[in-house]
Amino acid sequence: MIGASTSYYGYHGESIEGKVKKLIDIFASCDMQPYIQIGAGKNNKEYSKLVGILNKYRKENQVIFTIHQSIWLPSDDFYINIASSDRQIREDSIKCIQKNIEFARDIGVRDISFHGGYATDKLSQEYEFAPLDSQNSISYEEAYDNSIDSLNKLKKIANNDIKLSIENFNFRPERRYLFSRVGDFDRLPEGIGVILNIGHLYYTQKKLEQDNYINEMINALSDRVNEIHINDNDGSEDLHKLVGDGKIPIKEILEQIVKNRNIPHLIIEAHRNRHNYSDDDLANNILKLREIAKL
């Protein structure tokens, strides 16, 4: 299926249900079933009210939801980091994802995804889409130990009825991202899947100057991929543009993936405000990706 993320409208400001309703209308204009990723950001609506609204949308419009990161944050500036050296941040991050697991059960979602963490104790960001600043960096070895420990705890909480996946990050040593290279996934607990972000793959291939990087990642991870995030860039930055507005050979990458398996669900994860896109731009891009994905 072809889907789109609420993060198209940014992570703050407009309500989650408002973003979802806009995406439902966009899919209706494309004459397609709505497949909507509830992306990151802080939700300000009372839990049961939001669950009721989303279930109403789900039943009336046959919406299929998936969830990425968490909208249940303790504060607007909190960053989930399951690899943090700060025990409190790590525990609060696990609680955020645990709340997401409960949320998923209540709105009929069977899979959620999130980031595997950062080699730092704390993260900050001056404004939306600004670079993340890492504070008090820790060793990657310690960060991966913390992340794997957190993933095992979350796996028990999910109890096999909610599928968990982490996303491949782009390679940014200055931001201390985890899970950007092939070997980083070797210790991933059994049963934890992968959300493959094509924009991150392309950026990292250019950053590392390794021409075979994308193929190696696909060959190593394709069996674990539960979903694909689609966005475009020019290789110089993680721009989250619409399909075709950058230099990524998206069709060729999808062809490589389907050599090993059926094509997973595809989620367009572009940023409207960052690039002055419109709702019509997203609708046209959904139709464009549907054609590209006819492999």
Image (tube, grey):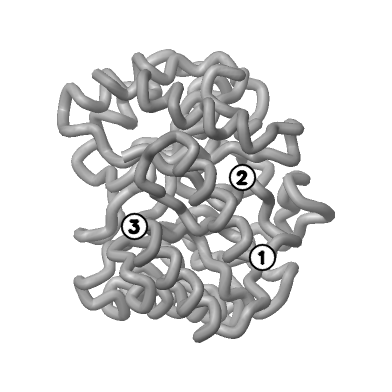
Residue plotted at (57% across, 75% down): 72
Up/down of 113 relative to 250, above or below: below
Q: Where in the figure is residue 198, as x and y percent of width and height?
A: 45, 31
Hey, which quadrant is residue 293 in on the image?
Answer: top left
> Which quadrant holds residue 28?
top left
User: Extreme right residue here?
Assistant: 126
Tell me the mark number nearer the camera, choosing from 3 and 1: 3
Q: Is residue 75 above or below residue 206?
A: below
Residue indicated by mark 3: 62
Left or right: 90 with respect to 229?
right
User: Residue at image x 55%, y 19%?
Assistant: 206
**Callout 3: 10 Å neighbours few (<14), some, many (20+)?**
some
The residue closer to the viewer here, 193 or 227, is 227
The residue wearing badge 1 is 15
Q: Quadrant of residue 19?
A: bottom right
Q: Residue at x 33, y 76 (%)?
A: 105
Q: Is 262 situated left or right of 37 in this image? A: left
Label 2 packing within 10 angstroms: few (<14), some (14-19), many (20+):
many
Whole-percent x and y of residue 260? Answer: 16, 28
Q: Residue 236: which numbered mark, if any?
A: none
Residue 14 relative to residue 197: left or right: right
Q: Earlier in the sequence, mark 3 or mark 1?
A: 1
Q: For the residue marked with disc 3, what is the amino acid? A: Gln
Residue hosting label 2: 8
Tell me if I can see residue 180 in this picture. Answer: no
Name the residue: 49% across, 51% down: 24
If you read the primary sequence from the N terminus, does the residue marked by circle 2 or circle 3 appear first?
Answer: 2
Q: How many marks?
A: 3
Q: Nearer the viewer, mark 2 or mark 3?
A: 3
